[in-house]
Image: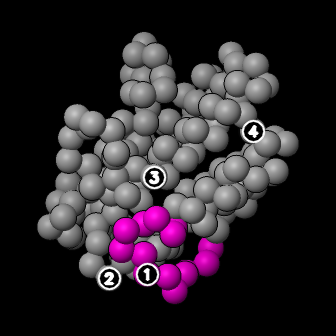
Amino acid sequence: MGAVEAREEVQRLGEQLKTFFREKTTEQMHEAMRKLVLDLFRELVQGSRESGSGSLQGTPVDTGRARGNWQIGIAAVPTALLEVKDKAGDATFSREAAKVLGEALRRDPFQLVTITNNLPYIDRLEDGWSKQAPNGWIRVAVERTRRRILPAERAS
């Protein structure tokens, strides 16, 4: 499986989430959406911090440019290519979390929220180009997120 399959998994998760969120109250939706986006974003950038969560390491790191280029867009898809190097991913997480915690998502939890990385080689990293993530990490993060938030009967 490669980057194309990862995109398909993300789209499938999006459809499942629409159903999941329809059953929530407004405040529950706001909180659930913020948590979902931030948890998935952290896992993509830095890996999982849960104990016993396996070996998911997040975005492979050499210079830190791949980690620093993750972006969250609310109501618009980010298109910028950032000149940011962030080996740990902390600055990237803080920068983008501010968007999720800000007013825009609070007003409308159903806005389009996009997590993207516009580096030209990010698909190659997902396809196993890096020895740090020979089986990718994006698909894995999406599937782990799906299992955490959706009841088992909806995740299939």
At label 1, the amino acid type is Lys
42 up-or-down from 30: above or below: below
Q: CA distance from mark 4 to mark 2?
A: 35 Å
Rate crowding at label 1 as few (under 14), some (14 to 19) or many (20 or more) other CA atoms within 10 Å. some
Rate crowding at label 3 as few (under 14), some (14 to 19) or many (20 or more) other CA atoms within 10 Å. many
In primary-sequence order, the first of circles 1 and 4 is: 1
At label 2, the amino acid type is Thr
Q: Which residue is mark 4?
A: 109
Magenta range: 79-92
Place of residue 147 in the rendered image (x, y in percent of width and height, measured from the top left): 39, 27
Q: CA distance from mark 2 to mark 1?
A: 6 Å
Place of residue 16 in the rendered image (x, y in percent of width and height, measured from the top left): 54, 28
Residue ranking furthest to the right: 107
Nearer to the camera, 156 or 82:
82
CB within 8 Å, label 2 to label 1: yes
SS class, disc 1: loop
Q: Image point 27% across, 78% down: which residue? A: 62
Q: Which residue is mark 3?
A: 42
Judge depth for marks 1 and 4 and give the one in front. Answer: 1
In primary-sequence order, the first of circles 3 and 1 is: 3
* Mark seen at residue 63: 2
CB within 8 Å, label 4 to label 2: no
Nearer to the camera, 29 or 18:
29
At label 4, the amino acid type is Pro
10 up-or-down from 92: above or below: above
Q: CA distance from mark 4 to mark 3?
A: 19 Å
